[in-house]
Amino acid sequence: MIIQKTENSRISTFDPNNFSFGNTFIDHMVICEYEDGKWGDVKLVPYGPIPFTPAMMGVNYGQACFEGMKAYKDKDGQVFLFRPEKNFERINKSATRLAMPEITEEMFLDGLKALVDIDRDWIPQGEGMSLYIRPLIFATEEALKARVSNKYMFAIVATPAKMYYSEPVSVKISDHYSRAASGGVGSAKAAGNYAASFYPTQLAIEEGYEQIIWTDDATHQYFEESGTMNVFVRINDTIYTPPTSEKILDGVTRDSFIKLAQKNGIEVKIEPVAVKDVVEAQKNGTLKEVWGVGTAVVTTVFQALGFNGEKLELPKLSDEESYAVQLKNELVNLQNNLVEDPFGWRVLVEKNVLETV
């Protein structure tokens, strides 16, 4: 790894009590370029702009994917990653689907650890605090021709993070727009998936909702995801969540919720979730809660579902009654090294890791 430390750290300007998620970037970033059929040296460099032209193929033809993950700092100042091997597996799955070259595990994990170590002072400590990390791969060749690019960049940037949604939100069940289609790129974290979601989300916001529950493209009769999150439904004391597929992202937080629920003896059914069953359960009082999960938000509890012009209110559960809150708290405590880790999910980032990479 080639290391170029910044001579002008901005850490003194960072106020951990006053910052916006996604707009404050740490001092360094990781970059690595692909050309002539191979990846070059991984470089840790000062964060900043990279020169590209409007003819860059990633901009014109959409070869771009990314990951979302976090680093956490415990009360003793130790820093941990959470299940980074899952993000490594998924970014390569996304790259393959978009006809981009895979990266090596060494590039990914060594780059992560080096970046998090050198900028560990940027990681805020406390409830709801973390460092949000964004690994990404995108096409960089300068060419206006619709074909696979010959040049790419792998990069890792990061931003301090705090609690995303603090209050329950209302979501609209989509009856027209879909996030992904069969045979498409729904199971990849493709940049274009997010671009395509913005317009339908804007329409939902204009109707008084904060987000959308995406339904299947063929019939709009089954839940798939919600916004940028995987979705969970609790009817009576059973949790339901749609199975992952080529249309549904295999979320790390989703998998963690499932395993924690099963560890706690909660029944989890991974099967198609029909809109009509959820609506019927709301009408007869057996629908206890619906929520979304993802890296950035951890958990977002829904307070109402919009369906056929009607706003269906959900029960207001106490923290002790809510599976969503219980599982979120257990996951966050595990991530922050407040409880034992029976799964081996936490990965300690050693200090001075740069001396070994």
Image: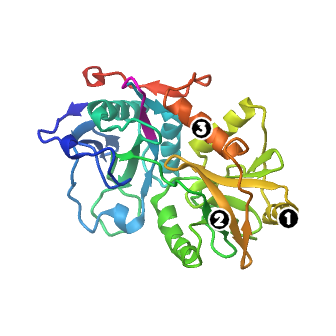
Spot occupied by residue 276 in the image (x, y as percentages of width and height): 82, 66
The image shows residue 355, relative to residue 192, as above or below, that is above
Of residues 75 and 290, which is closer to you in this image? 75
Circle 3: residue type = Asn
Q: Secondary structure at mark 3?
A: helix
Q: Earlier in the sequence, mark 3 or mark 1?
A: 1
Circles 2 and 1, Cβ within 8 Å, touching? The answer is no
Q: Secondary structure at mark 2?
A: strand
Quadrant assignment, res 125:
top left
The C terminus - image quarter: top left
Circle 2: residue type = Trp
Q: Earlier in the sequence, mark 2 or mark 1?
A: 2
- Asked if residue 26 lies in the magenta stretch, the reply is no
User: Label 1: which residue?
Assistant: 280
The N terminus - image quarter: top left
> Of the residues tagged 2 and 1, which is closer to the observer?
1
Q: Is residue 338 left or right of residue 325?
A: left
Q: Secondary structure at mark 1?
A: helix
Give the residues in magenta.
Answer: 70-77
Circle 1: residue type = Glu
User: Label 2: which residue?
Assistant: 214
Calculate the distance from the C-alpha at mark 2 to the C-alpha at mark 1. Answer: 18 Å
> Of the residues tagged 3 and 1, which is closer to the observer?
3
Of residues 238 and 322, which is closer to you in this image? 322
User: Label 3: which residue?
Assistant: 329
Circles 3 and 2, Cβ within 8 Å, touching? The answer is no
